[in-house]
Amino acid sequence: MSDRRSQRRKTHITTERPPFERIALILQGGGALGAYQAGVSQALAEANLHPDWVAGISIGAINSALIAGNSPAERVDRLREFWEAVSTPPFGIPDPKWLEVRGDLSRSLLNQAHSLGALLGGVPNFFVPRVPPPYLQPKALWTLPAIMMLRRYGRRSNGSSTST
């Protein structure tokens, strides 16, 4: 039975580009989707399906900028570096992998604690909370970490630019 199953298994790796005029990649928003989108980008790269056009909204726009801002050979590595950097827990406290969470209440409490950490400390290398709140600030520089991340990971090795 396992032989039959392995014969039916299809792979995403192709040897030539499909006969499409253009390949477009449209990425939507939603923070958790961003890491998933990076995995999709990796699968597309492994299948030799490099998008000609990329566009996105919210976190999808950030991933799109990283894809467009790097050569096809560097995209997956830059996306991985970005997502590893922004997945760092706030305050340098590691995520307790040894803590086995059971039940809806425990999971909810852990999620609330993580949300509180992001609210108070931001997400390292991505954003910092605005203190004082934006309506009390004449100029908000709270996006500076995100801008620095895009500059760090959005390089093109051949010197050309790609529109998003």
Image (tube, rainbow, N blue to C red):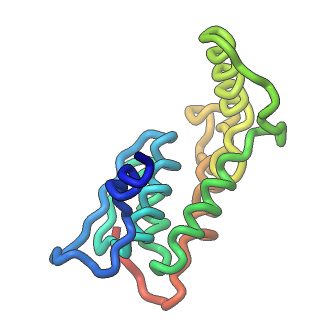
At 34% across and 67% down in the image, what residue appears? 164
x then y, percent, for residue 67: 45, 68
The answer to whether residue 94 is above or below residue 159 is above
At 71% across and 19% down in the image, what residue appears? 101
At 66% across and 30% down in the image, what residue appears? 119
Residue with the most extreme top position: 105
Residue with the most extreme bottom position: 158
Picture quadrant of residue 122: top right
Picture quadrant of residue 115: top right
x then y, percent, for residue 117: 72, 30
Residue 50 in view of the camera: no
Picture quadrant of residue 92: top right
Q: Is residue 83 left or right of residue 2?
A: right
At 43% across and 87% down in the image, what residue appears? 160
Q: Is residue 142 left or right of residue 96?
A: left
Residue 35 in view of the camera: yes
x then y, percent, for residue 2: 44, 49
The answer to whether residue 115 is above or below residue 53 is above
x then y, percent, for residue 146: 60, 55
> Along the line of sight, which residue is nearer the eye, 93 or 41?
41
